[in-house]
């Protein structure tokens, strides 16, 4: 199949994805808020049995839920180029909230909760893998922008966002499988692993489709509005430093 040279990600599909993210992510946030007020009455805590009584586990769950809400909310407008151009400071502050809530709270608390997760070894390893992938991609995305490598930053943050969005995919699949009559434990494990695989596949496809992820030089904000870039752009040199000496083999006096 012949693809056009500069294939752009279809805007309509991106808009549908964004609306679904806001609605379903909002639903998760609304359903999670009672963890801070209802405590014991939350069915998830009741299902956990003895570990649900542990103060450490409960503290980890509250940290996890709070940082998950920050993470979902902070990601909402991060992939809009128009928003980034008009309000670069908002992108930076939301990005910081996303990165620090993920690296310091969401992934570490999730990794601790994973040790006691439902679904036995398959469930535990699934959550640990998810946490590892999200931590790794978020850290790489943060490092990339600190060295002003925008394409790499976009790539890694798309991967990180895909992992955050498994919170949504997992619940959608879990509900779908339950309605289809799948046994609870099998449902939990399959929904978890499938949500990771699906989201990784979508992220990698989007990365291949978006031209910005292939560019070598920063073109989003540094070129159009140098005052908006942070850290400030380095001066660009048109010349390249030439090697001081030619390789020995090609020096004319050696012939
Ligand atoms: C923004 C993304 C995330 C949100 C909003 C989120 C939210 C939640 C919530 C609300 C719960 C409580 C259970 C429920 O009410 O369904 C939970 C449980 C849990 N989360 Fe997350 N989470 C996110 C990402 C992650 C990540 C990246 C990991 C990976 C380490 C993870 C690991 C877990 C584990 C292990 C549990 C307990 C599951 C169990 O005991 O069976 N979560 N999460």
Image (spheres, rainbow, N blue to C red):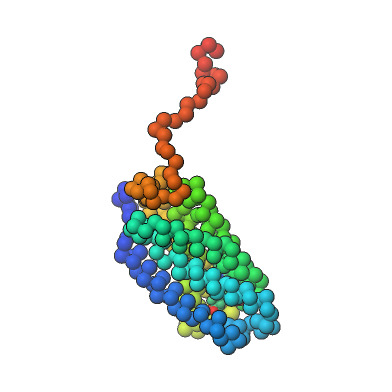
Q: Residue at x 50, y 67 (%)?
A: 71
Q: Residue at x 57, y 67 (%)?
A: 106
How far across and how far down the image is residue 137, in percent?
53, 57
Is 169 placed above or below 214 here?
below
How far across and how far down the image is residue 119, in percent?
61, 76
Viewer-side residue, 40 vs 47: 40
Q: Is residue 36 visible?
A: yes
Q: Which image quarter has ligand 1? A: bottom right
| Farthest front residue in view | 227
Disc count in the image?
0
Viewer-side residue, 84 vs 176: 84
Q: Residue at x 47, y 58 (%)?
A: 157
How far across and how far down the image is residue 72, in percent?
47, 69
How far across and how far down the image is residue 152, in percent?
47, 50
Q: Is residue 122 left or right of residue 73?
A: right
Q: Is residue 152 visible?
A: no
Is 60 placed above or below 208 here?
below
Instruction: Give residue 83's quadrant in the image.
Output: bottom left
Viewer-side residue, 149 vs 163: 149
Q: Is residue 110 left or right of residue 226?
A: right
């Amino acid at each position: 199949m012949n693809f056009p040279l500069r294939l752009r990600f279809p805007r309509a599909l991106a808009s549908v994805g964004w609306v679904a993210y806001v609605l379903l992510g909002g639903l998760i946030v609304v359903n999670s808020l009672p963890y801070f007020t209802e405590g014991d009455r939350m069915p998830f805590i009741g299902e956990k049995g003895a570990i649900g009584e542990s103060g450490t586990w409960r503290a980890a769950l509250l940290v996890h839920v709070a940082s998950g809400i920050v993470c979902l909310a902070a990601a909402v407008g991060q992939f809009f180029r128009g928003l980034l151009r008009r309000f670069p400071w908002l992108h930076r502050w939301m990005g910081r909230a996303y990165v620090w809530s993920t690296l310091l709270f969401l992934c570490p608390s999730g990794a601790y909760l994973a040790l006691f997760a439902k679904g036995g070894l398959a469930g535990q390893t699934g959550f640990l893998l998810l946490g590892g992938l999200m931590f790794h991609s978020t850290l790489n995305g943060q490092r990339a922008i600190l060295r002003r490598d925008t394409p790499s930053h976009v790539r890694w943050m798309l991967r990180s966002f895909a992992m955050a969005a498994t919170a949504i995919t997992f619940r959608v699949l879990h509900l779908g499988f339950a309605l289809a009559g799948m046994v609870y434990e099998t449902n939990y494990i399959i929904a978890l692993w499938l949500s990771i695989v699906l989201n990784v596949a979508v992220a990698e496809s989007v990365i291949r489709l978006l031209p910005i992820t292939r560019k070598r030089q920063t073109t989003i904000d540094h070129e159009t509005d140098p005052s908006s870039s942070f850290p400030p752009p380095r001066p660009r040199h048109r010349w390249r430093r030439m090697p001081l000496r030619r390789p020995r083999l090609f020096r004319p006096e050696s012939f």
